Image (tube, helix red, strand yellow):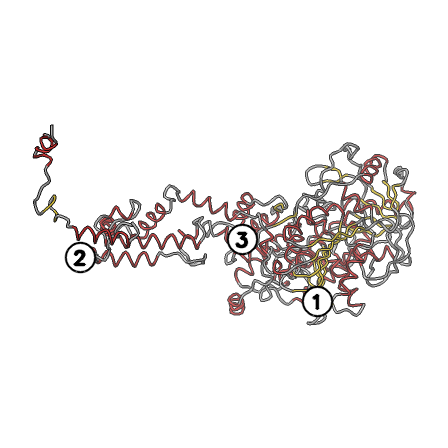
Amino acid sequence: MSQKNLPSQRTTAFRISRHPTYDGRPMPTVGGLLQARTELQEREGKPVEKKTSKPPAKDYREIYTLTEQVLMKLTPPPVHSPNVHSWYKRNPMPPKELRTRYQAFANKVLAGFTVQDYTATGNSLPTPEKIATVHKEGRGLDGFFFSSFLQYIGQKDLGKKDIHMINIKKAGDMRFPQEWYPMARQFKRTWHLHVGPTNSGKTYNALKRLEESADGIYAGPLRLLAHEIFERMNAKGIPCNLVTGDDRRVVSATAAIASSTVEMVDLNRQVEVAVLDEIQMIGDEDRGWAWTQALLGVRAKEVHMCGEERTVDLIKSLAASVGDECIVHNYTRLGPLEVMKESLGGDLNKIQNGDCVVTFSRKSIFAMKKDIEKVTGLRCAVIYGSLPPETRSLQAKHFNDPESGYDVLVASDAVGMGLNLSVKRMIFETTIKWNGSEYEAISVPHIKQIAGRAGRYKVAVSKHNIQADETVAPLPAAPSVGLVTTLDEVDYKSLKYAMSVTPKSIPTAGILPTSSQIEEFASLYPPDKELSFILKEMDETMRTAKLFHICRVEEQIKTARLLEGILGLRILEKLQFCMAPIGRDLKVQEAVRRMAECVGSNKDGSLLEIPNVDLEVLDIDNPKTMPVLQRLESLHKTILVWLWLSWRFPATFAPRETAQELKEICEAKIDIALSNVRFERGKKPAYERLSLGASMDVEESAGDTDVEGPPTGHGDEDDFEGTVLPHLNDNLVDSERLNQVSASN
């Protein structure tokens, strides 16, 4: 059969239509196909783009204009701002990314007015019809667009509570404190770590380098040390200014050297040398943040640190984390230190001239003083933490001076740091202390720190009373052997064991949030939330890296509670009060609340006008009893807090000269009381002493071991210098506050 006879070719169903139109459209021509192929080649195979030049529908022109205005108003700024809408301020997305995503969202919403098929703009975008309906119903376009935007960026399922928790977690992120000090990161620094036991000359060498430098900073843990370096430098003809929490002394506006407490280190000043004393304090649970801030933030070409060998690993790691070089200088003790073969067996007749007896409460100090003077006829000087620094220095001078008539020193652990003593033998009356709720063993590092004061270099008694390893004076010849023992046999084994072991390394450096971080955290809560609540919530939220630990803020929270109900105080002003050296003395706390009320209400805050300040105790001519001595100590603390605040609120707390005069009178009265007060010794409590096999953890906080009551963790209560929070401006009194105070006064 031939192909022309095939049925398929004769069937009309397979015939091609010759009608000029094809399915309702013009039949394509050969020319048209060639043109289409040429255009396709020019587009490189891409489909034809739909034209969107169609103007907005007539019915939606008014809605389009309104939509454009609302979307423009809601545009987030590229960076966080105090005036930014709370929706964006609390969003976990970075500001720049949030702004970019929002602009894309707004463009697509507006483009929806120019297309026929609204689904082409995305199901998550509002259509003109929906926008018009929301507007007509009066529901508000702000919330509608915000909800649509959250859906557009994938946050539709995140409720306000979820977003709040995301922001809380973000604000509590403290993992990279190295980044808090960008100025210090801009140039290369060299760290010099001087480590060794007490009386090894480490501080002497660091201070010698400071003396040789063109300009520099000394930072110590105590006001006493800052004063010592201030006086010594100026005595050698090197101009040096003093900066502590409650005192500023400007010898010269162009002085090259500044001596300060570690909390008051100027991070804005660029110098050649900075000396950070007692660097092991970086691991302290309360004040460690101040050493970390100074170490990471000081702008010095050379940073010299003096302290214990157990800091080496941590300091090396910190140096590596910021790219600085760390050089370790090791020192050995210049004179031998030995534990005696036996205790004194409780026999006070064995107390000798030049001994220092250490006990851990004020009552025990005065009881021991009374018994030693009664049994031996030797006269005792006393030192403990609640005494004013000036009084402690004077008592140390009496003890060091062989012509003063003082033979023995009875002291608390306040002798472990900051005082320069010519001690022949250190005798521990006990190796346990009351921590506020129970007795506990003195930590090994703390025992070593105190014991190391024995056998220190003998110096001539002078106005400054400086020791060799804390001055720029030449080192003298080696002294006799320093001896350590206990008064009673029950403590002897604990002491011998503690002196024979090496404490573990300090694992972490302390940090605290900056004032701006606290403000940011507070902004996530309603403005009427109390600062105590904010600090507590932040303390529970904060997290950090393995090199750091968050310092305790319990004392600051207590002070914040003390300020509750005082009107007119701004958050930064409350933070200043929280960092003041208040302590736990109830009389001081009440006076501080009155001072805060003066700031909040812009009233006169002169010391003589503050209610509940016990100035009447100064009228007692010859103080003899313990209650009077305690009143004098409370008054002195109150005056110190007032002076501390006067440097932060000078418009409120003035004149400063009156307070200084009252402070000196109070110190003279305290010195008289120390000679008169007597107290009976009590029985030593039964407690299992530190023994071989006991847990050798890292150094614990010394606690406030020389007054009854809960410990503060600062060692000696008055040793806490009181300071500003990290990066908190030292003077919070702005022009507005000054004007308010002037107007009300």
Q: Can residue 578 be seen in this view?
A: yes
Quadrant in the picture for residue 434:
top right
Tag 3: Cα neighbours inside 10 Å, few (<14), some, or many (≥20)? some
Nearest to viewer (mark 1 / mark 2): 2
Q: Which mark is residue 594?
A: none
Where's residue 702, x and y in %? Answer: 72, 45
Q: The residue under label 2 is which amino acid type?
A: Lys
- The residue beneath circle 2 is 58
User: For the residue labelled by badge 3, is the local secondary structure a helix, a strand or a loop?
Assistant: helix
Q: The residue under label 1 is which amino acid type?
A: Arg
User: For the residue labelled by badge 2, is the local secondary structure a helix, a strand or a loop?
Assistant: helix
* Along the line of sight, the residue nearer the viewer: 496 or 52: 52
State the CA–CA distance, disc 2 to disc 3. 51 Å
Total number of numbered discs in the rendering: 3
Where's residue 356, x and y in %? Answer: 85, 48
- The residue beneath circle 3 is 517
Is 259 rendered above or below residue 588? below
* Along the line of sight, the residue nearer the viewer: 520 or 39: 39
Q: Residue 249 carries which label?
A: 1
Where's residue 367, x and y in %? Answer: 81, 44
